Amino acid sequence: MLIDFVDLIGKKIDVELSGGIFHKGILLDCGLDIIVIYDGKNHSFLYIPFNHVQRLKETSLEEEDLNNNPPAEKPIETDVISFRKALTVAKGLFTQIYVTGNKSIHGYLTSIMNDYFVFHSPVYKTMFISMNHVKWLIPYSPNTTPYSLDKENLPLVPMSTPLARSFDEQLKRLENQLVIIDGGDHTEKIGVLQKIRNNKITLITAEGERIYRNVEHIKTIQLP
């Protein structure tokens, strides 16, 4: 447990994340690289990697911001919490992941590698998500499914080919394929991944324009 935060466990805190994102809630747990807060307003447990925390402080919450006390059981129960352990325990649970933009991704973690994981979404299908860019994850109770779909209508599609251990090695396996980067929030993030070299990718857009991108700033990648 982070020594600096021991006195804040069970207290109401205000957290600022990179990108100007703010959360309020009760600090339930913390580890060397993660904090866990309960957002009573949305009845959610947020698992926040500490590398995106800009600052946190004790605060007062209005009654309407905290409708009730945290449930006795967290969706992820473990003796010592860490980001990787949270991901591991969340495998198979319906989970909300936030990495960038104005929307979260809902689905299931299916594989965890060295610095990325595979996420299956009913909307976006199979995605490769860099661990470095996950700002928070919200695991739901075991009986919850996305969009209230029946499990029969929500097949988890396993990867038919072996996965690479690292994110950049996985990108190399996608060379010469049409890919969507970061959910395709810009036309320059959709195209053929021509090659990856020295931590940079070359992407050919629909107009035939050659775009170079730094792999360190790629948050998610998927096949259409």
Image (tube, grey):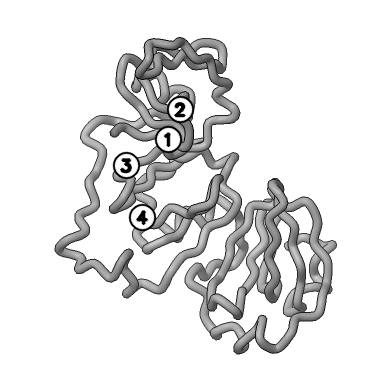
Q: Residue 55: which quarter of the image?
A: bottom right
Q: Which residue is mark 3?
A: 126
Q: Amino acid at mark 2?
A: Lys
Q: Nearer the viewer, residue 153 or 37?
A: 153
| Residue 20 - label | none
Residue 148 lies in what quarter of the image? bottom left
Mark 4 or mark 3, which has the lower sequence index? Answer: 4
CA gap between label 1 and label 3 equals 14 Å
Disc number placed over residue 108 in the picture, else none: 4
Up the image or down, 187 lies above or below 155; here it is: above
Q: Position of residue 216 (x, y in %)?
A: 59, 27
Identified at 60% across, 51% down, the residue is 135
- Give the residue type that dot 4 points to: Tyr
In the displayed structure, does residue 43 sit left or right of residue 15? Answer: left
Disc number lying in front (2 or 3): 2
| Front in this rendered view, residue 1 or 54 | 54
Are dots 2 and 1 in contact, CB under 8 Å? yes
Look at the picture and state if 10 lies above or below 121.
below
Mark 2 residue element: helix
Residue 189 is marked as 2
